[in-house]
Image: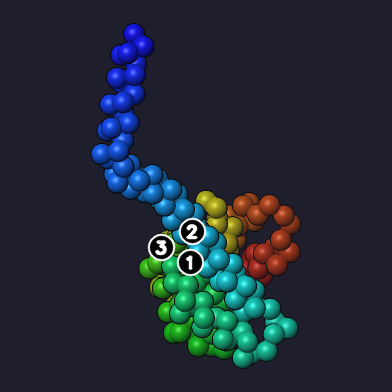
Amino acid sequence: MAEDNLDFTDKLAQWGAQNIKYISIGVLIGVLIPLAWNYNQYLEVEKNLTASELYYKAINIENSEEVITSSAEQILLNHPGSIYEVLIKFMLSKQEFENKNYTLARNYLEQIIDADASNTYNSLASIKIALIHIQEKEYELALNNLENVEMKEAFKQILSETKGDIYKYMGDMEKSIKYYNEAIAASAINNENLSMKHNSVKN
């Protein structure tokens, strides 16, 4: 029995000596793969931290316009596909909307929808596009955009309120009251502004 064990040990040692190159390569691969994966994780974390810092620079109103613009541009250039690209496009769209640059504001929102980062962002972008159409008095287009909102239940109050606004501007007071009532019913709090809209149509 002892001789058999010794013979087996000798054979194992002989096999190891003959295949040492392949054993070494296997060990090296076994070590390098986890290291490479961890390094890639590290790079991803570092990239997200950089994008996060740039984003907070961009939204900090205490920063100069130059710093805000530069931070936004760096996110768009160096962090495509990230959540920060989506957020910065919402910010840029809001700025253009406030400056009455409606076409550019809408372009940023359409890019968000095309990126398809999430249903939530797509829904918000569609609602904001509808608000732009309202400013441009394109009421049918605004209604069409509201129909594109995927998360209708989650955004029921804002959807109904916006429809109430649209039909009020279109002169259809019956539908306006209908949607204001739906918005009030969906509201979790006593919304004074919404109640004022409703009463202005009712009276």
Instruction: Report x, y in % for residue 127.
Output: 50, 67
Question: Which callout, 3 or 1, points at the residue further toward the start of the chain?
Answer: 1
Question: Which callout, 3 or 2, points at the residue further toward the start of the chain?
Answer: 2
Alpha carbons under labels 3 and 2: distance apart: 28 Å
User: What secondary structure is found at the residue carrying circle 3?
Assistant: loop
Residue that badge 3 annotates: 116
Q: Based on the displayed image, in which of its 4 quarters is residue 143 positioned?
A: bottom left
Say if residue 106 shows up in the picture. Answer: no
Q: Residue at x 32, y 31 (%)?
A: 13
Binning the other alpha carbons within 10 Å of mark 1 as few (below 14), some (14 to 19) or many (20 upward) gives some
Q: Would residue 58 be found to the left or right of residue 6 on screen?
A: right
Instruction: Report x, y in % for residue 192.
Output: 73, 64
Residue that badge 1 annotates: 82
Name the foreground residue: 203 vs 73: 73
The amino acid sitting under disc 2 is Tyr
User: What secondary structure is found at the residue carrying circle 2?
Assistant: helix
Alpha carbons under labels 3 and 1: distance apart: 12 Å
Q: Would residue 106 be found to the left or right of residue 10 on screen?
A: right
Q: Based on the displayed image, in which of its 4 quarters is residue 157 positioned?
A: bottom right
Binning the other alpha carbons within 10 Å of mark 2 as few (below 14), some (14 to 19) or many (20 upward) gives few
From the image, which quarter does the C terminus lie in? bottom right
The amino acid sitting under disc 1 is Ser
The amino acid sitting under disc 3 is Asp
Q: Residue at x 46, y 84 (%)?
A: 104
Say if residue 69 shows up in the picture. Answer: yes
Number of numbered discs overlaid on the protein picture: 3
Q: Would residue 203 be found to the left or right of residue 97 on screen?
A: right
Residue that badge 2 annotates: 39
Name the foreground residue: 132 vs 14: 14
Instruction: Report x, y in % for residue 178.
Output: 55, 58
Q: Depth-wise, is mark 3 or mark 2 nearer the camera?
A: 2
